[in-house]
Image (cartoon, rainbow, N blue to C red):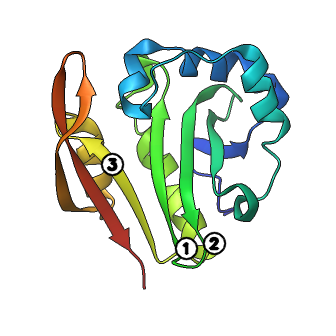
Amino acid sequence: MKTLQGEHIYLRALEPEDLEFIHEIENNQDIWEISNTITPYSKFLIKQYLDHAHKDIFEVKQLRLVICNYEDVPLGMIDLFDFDFKHRRAGVGVLIKDVENRQKGYGKEALELLINYCKMHLDLHQLYCNISEDNTMSLKLFKNHGFEIVGLKKDWNFVNGSFKNEYLLQIRFK
């Protein structure tokens, strides 16, 4: 089995054709909280990002992959960010775009594939993620994959007029 191919989904690099898909995600105010975004992105900026998406993770310190089903329909994205080669760690985030595609195992399978990729090809020692205290579905997803809560950042994010706590989770390999 190839590292980025699962039973129901596969992970692939960004393509120029992903412009509309990414534009919809980045401008969906319902998910700005999880991406710490407060302003919309233009198609021009996203196109520039896509033009540079081919660059190596060692250069740009991030990797964004599209989660696709085997009908080649993009379902979401999974990201590595803050890639630190020296300390062999990176942050990870998962997003399934449409509510009707959530809780169907796509995020679970994507995270499994990415963890294996990180161990086999990037030789990482650990991954971490930041999850809002009230995001029970994401907490469950990451905990079920061996991530442990290692800290609670109190009043960490200001969302809709009030502060929210955020958990720091990590998984270590080897």
Q: Quadrant of the N terminus?
A: bottom right
Residue type marked 1: Lys
Marks 2 & 1, CB-CB < 8 Å contact: yes
Q: Callout 3 environment at 10 Å: few (<14), some (14 to 19), or many (20+)? A: many
Q: Determine which residue is flagged by label 2.
A: 122
Q: Quadrant of residue 147?
A: bottom left
Residue ranking furthest to the bottom = 174
The residue at 47%/78% (across/down) is 125
- Percent coordinates x, y for residue 156 in the rendering: 23, 41
**Foreground: 109 or 32?**
32
Image x and y of residue 48, in percent: 81, 29
In the rendered image, which residue does mark 3 sit on? 130
Amino acid type at mark 2: Leu
Compute the Cα span from label 2 to label 3: 21 Å
First in residue order: circle 2 vs circle 3: 2
For the residue labelled by badge 2, is the local secondary structure a helix, a strand or a loop?
loop
Q: Nearer the viewer, mark 2 or mark 3?
A: 3
Amino acid type at circle 3 is Asn
> In the shown orientation, is residue 154 left or right of residue 24?
left
Residue 8 drawn above or below residue 86: above
Taking 143 as reference, is 104 above or below it?
above
- Where residue 153 appears, as percent x and y from the top left, is 19, 50
The residue under label 1 is: 119
The residue under the point 55% across, 73% down is 119
